[in-house]
C-alpha cells in the first residue's frame, strides 16, 4: 500500500492502530475512562440545571463575589485585558472569527486538492469546527430557555452590570462558546498532522491566546456583572461536555475516512 497517498498526520489504519497513530488497545481504555467522566459530568450538569431552575435568584456568596471583584480597583489597562475575551465573543466579531477560520481551512484544502495533494483533513477540520461552534451555541440557547435563570441586575445589590440583555443567564453562553470554539482549535493544533508541520511554531501565539481566553472568559463575565458564579461554572461544564462529543466525532470521522481510503487503495 502506498502510504504517501494519505494525509499528513493520517496513516493507514490497522487492527492495532488508528488513522491518528494511536494504539487501539490503549485508545479503547482511554475512551472508556473519558466516557465514564463524561457521563458523570452530564449528571452533574443536569442536577445543576434543575437546582438553578428551582432557585433562580443568586446565592448570597455569588452576589458577594461579584461585589468583591467589582470593588477591586484594577488599573484600566488590566480591566481592558480582562474584558477583551467578552468583547471578542460578541455575536458579530465571533461570527467573523469563525468565518475566517472556516473559509481559511477550506481555501487551504482546495489549494492542496488543486495541487493534487491530500486535502481531506482540511475539509474535515473546517466542517467539524463550524459544526462544533454552531451546534454548541444552539444547545446553549435551548438549555438557557429551559433553566430560565434571570440575568444579574443592579436591583440584586450594589453591583455594576455592563450590559442588560433580555436573555436567561444559566449556563453562560460566552463561557460555553469559548470552551467549545477555542478548545476545538487547540485540539486541532495538537493533532499529529500539525505536530509534524515544520512551521508549527507559528501557531504558538494562537495557542497561548486560546488558553488565556478559556481561563479568563469566566472571570470576565463575573467582573462585568453579566453572569453569576454558577452561570460561569455551568458554562465551563457544558462547553467541556460538548467539546468532548465533537472531538470524539472528529476522531471517528478521521478513522472512518482513512479506512475507506485504505479499502479503495486495496481495490485499485
Image: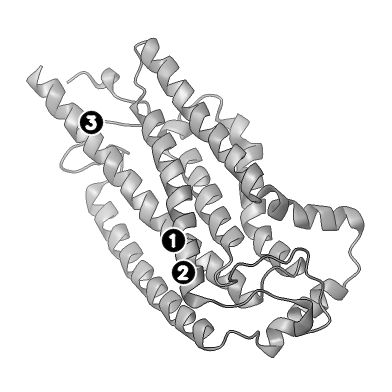
SS type, badge 1: helix
- Residue drawn 27% across the image and 19% down it: 5
Q: Which mark is residue 143?
A: 2
The answer to which image quadrant residue 139 occupies is: bottom left
Image position of 71 with respect to 212: above or below: below
Residue 171 in picture, x, y percent from top left: 55, 69
Relative depth, front residue between 89 and 260: 89
Q: Which residue is mark 3?
A: 12
> Which one is nearer the viewer's eye here, 215 or 29?
215
Which image quarter: residue 231? bottom right
Q: Which element carries disc 2, helix, strand or loop?
A: helix
Q: CA distance from mark 1 to mark 3?
A: 35 Å
Q: Position of residue 180 (x, y in %)?
A: 50, 53
Residue 161 badge: none
Instruction: Tell me the crowding category of disc 1: few under 14, some 14 to 19, or many 20 or more residues within 10 angstroms, Cα based.
Output: some
Counting residues from the N terminus, which is met first, the one under dot 3 or under dot 2? 3
Of tags 3 and 2, the one toward the viewer is 2
Q: Where does the C terminus fall, quadrant-wise?
A: top left
Q: Nearer the viewer, residue 268 or 219?
A: 219
Upstream in sequence: badge 1 or badge 3: 3
Residue 208 seen in this snapshot: no
Q: For the residues labelled 1 and 2, say whether their Cβ atoms are less than 8 Å apart.
A: yes
- Position of 249 with respect to 202 (left or right) is left
Q: Is residue 14 left or right of residue 5?
A: left
Query: Is residue 10 depicted above or below 113 in this figure?
Result: below
- For image coordinates 49% across by 55% down, the residue present is 137
Dot 3 lies on which element? loop
Q: Which residue is mark 1?
A: 139
Quarter of the rendering occupied by the N terminus: top left
Q: Residues within 10 Å of mark 2 (few under 14, many from 20)?
A: some
Q: Residue at 50% x, 39% y: name it.
A: 189
Indicate the position of residue 88 as horizontal and vertical percent values.
Answer: 69, 47
Amino acid at each position: 500500500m502506498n502510504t504517501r497517498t494519505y494525509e499528513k498526520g493520517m496513516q493507514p489504519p490497522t487492527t492495532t492502530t488508528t488513522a491518528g497513530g494511536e494504539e487501539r488497545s490503549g485508545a479503547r481504555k482511554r475512551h472508556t475512562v473519558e466516557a465514564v467522566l463524561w457521563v458523570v459530568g452530564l449528571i452533574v450538569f443536569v442536577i445543576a440545571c434543575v437546582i438553578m431552575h428551582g432557585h433562580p435568584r443568586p446565592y448570597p456568596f455569588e452576589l458577594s463575589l461579584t461585589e468583591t471583584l467589582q470593588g477591586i480597583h484594577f488599573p484600566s489597562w488590566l480591566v481592558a485585558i480582562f474584558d477583551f475575551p467578552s468583547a471578542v465573543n460578541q455575536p458579530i466579531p465571533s461570527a467573523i472569527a469563525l468565518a475566517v477560520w472556516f473559509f481559511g481551512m477550506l481555501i487551504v484544502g482546495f489549494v492542496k486538492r488543486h495541487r493534487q495533494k491530500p486535502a481531506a483533513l482540511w475539509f474535515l477540520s473546517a466542517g467539524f469546527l463550524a459544526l462544533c461552534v454552531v451546534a454548541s451555541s444552539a444547545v446553549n440557547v435551548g438549555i438557557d430557555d429551559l433553566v430560565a435563570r434571570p440575568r444579574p441586575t443592579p436591583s440584586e445589590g450594589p453591583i455594576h452590570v455592563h450590559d442588560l440583555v433580555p436573555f436567561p443567564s444559566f449556563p453562560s453562553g460566552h463561557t460555553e462558546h469559548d470552551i467549545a470554539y477555542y478548545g476545538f482549535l487547540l485540539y486541532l493544533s495538537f493533532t499529529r498532522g500539525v505536530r509534524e508541520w515544520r512551521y508549527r511554531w507559528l501557531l504558538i501565539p494562537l495557542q497561548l491566546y486560546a488558553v488565556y481566553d478559556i481561563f479568563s472568559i469566566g472571570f470576565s463575565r463575573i467582573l462585568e456583572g453579566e453572569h453569576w458564579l454558577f452561570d460561569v461554572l455551568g458554562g465551563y461544564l457544558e462547553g467541556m461536555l460538548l467539546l468532548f462529543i465533537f472531538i470524539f466525532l472528529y476522531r471517528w470521522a478521521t478513522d472512518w475516512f482513512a479506512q475507506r481510503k485504505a479499502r479503495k487503495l486495496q481495490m485499485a
